[in-house]
Image (cartoon, rainbow, N blue to C red):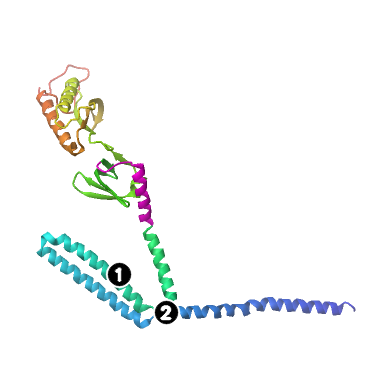
Amino acid sequence: MTMRPYLFLRRLINASLAATLFTAPVIAAPAVDAQDAPDVAEIVNFIRVGGVLVSLGVIVGAGIVARFLHNIVESLGQRFVHRRLTFQKTESFLRFGIYLTTGAVVLALSFRINDTVLALVGGTMAVAVGFALRDLVAAMIAGVTIMFDRPFQVGDRVQFAGEYGDVTAIGLRSVRIQTLDDNTVTVPNNKVLTDVTSCGNYGALDMQVQIDFYIGIDQDIVLAERLVKEALLTSQYIFLEKPITVLLKQVVQEHYVVIHLRAKGYVLDTRYEKAFETDVSRRTLLALREHGVQSPSILQRHIGGPKTSPHA
């Protein structure tokens, strides 16, 4: 009988604690929502509904102006052909100006400009510019590395990513290559550092050139080797201060055996590389034909019996 008041008091305390724990989140949750509601309303107040509608008209108008500008440039380019490239360059600058002006007008019409909007726009532009300049900064750092490491120099004949030609400029952002087809190729500096680049002369005027010839397996290989070497030595583009060689080996080509001769000589100037190849190839082929050295062909052999003439 003496323990009943104690049990009653204990149950009352537990019930009070349970009621406090279950009702506390319910009371706190509306407070958070009430705190967030003004922020949403403040953000909505930044937007001008009427300005947004006007901005759509501005964007459409800017598109019409850009299209009209393009038509004018096309018409002028057809009428004044010698000024066509100048007109196209001018169109690019004007189109870029139209885009910037349209963006500024749309921003001014659609939002109420204050410190919060300026901070928001500034942060967004900073992130966008940071992502846009990421590759540019990497290319500039690679350009400085190329200047000090010097994997090639201006005037060198290089091969990179399937492009072959002379290096005409090394800048902070890119390397320009003039190909043998008279095309200008621009390669970002960071691509040059990460990919394999082959340099033929590395600062020198002369460069080794390889020219391949093929003859039949049954032809006079000693005579063919001598004729190829004579064509190298007597070329007007040969650089005789460096050695010339003629390599010879037997290879399988198109399912039959041939003799492969590779002439290796140095041209006196990289500008004459193709002229050197043409000169040596023309005189070698004429000499081989004159001495009866024939090109590869399929041979037929008779096993276990006398040989018969194919013309019999």
Range shown magenta: 134-155
Query: In 3D space, how far apart are the residues under numbered discs 2 and 1 (Cα atoms)?
Result: 22 Å
- Please state the horizontal and vertical placement of residue 129, each as a whole percent of the image: 38, 63
Q: Which mark is residue 46?
A: 2
Judging depth in this view, the residue of 182 and 306 nearest the camera is: 182
Residue situated furthest right in the rendering: 1
For the C terminus, which image quadrant? Answer: top left
Q: State which quadrant residue 105 falls in.
A: bottom left
Up/down of 104 relative to 224, above or below:
below
As for residue 147 lying within the magenta part, the answer is: yes
Secondary structure found at label 1: helix
CB within 8 Å, label 2 to label 1: no
Up/down of 50 relative to 147, above or below:
below
Q: State which quadrant residue 270 falls in.
A: top left
- Please state the horizontal and vertical placement of residue 187, each as a whole percent of the image: 29, 50
Up/down of 35 relative to 309, above or below:
below
Q: Which residue is located at x 29 percent, y 44 percent?
A: 160
As for residue 73 lying within the magenta part, the answer is: no
Residue situated furthest bottom in the rendering: 50
Q: Is 150 placed left or right of 82 in the picture?
A: right
Up/down of 50 relative to 138, above or below:
below
Crowdedness near tag 2: few (<14), some (14–19) or many (≥20) residues, C-alpha within 10 Å: some
Q: Which residue is located at x 30 percent, y 39 percent?
A: 198
Q: Residue 100 carries which label?
A: 1
- Please state the horizontal and vertical placement of residue 282, each as a whole percent of the image: 12, 32
Which amino acid does the dot numbered 2 rest on?
Phe
Secondary structure found at label 2: helix
**Predominant SS of the magenta segment:** helix
Which amino acid does the dot numbered 1 rest on?
Leu
Q: Which of marks 2 and 1 is nearer the N terminus?
A: 2
Q: Which residue is located at x 48 percent, y 78 percent?
A: 40
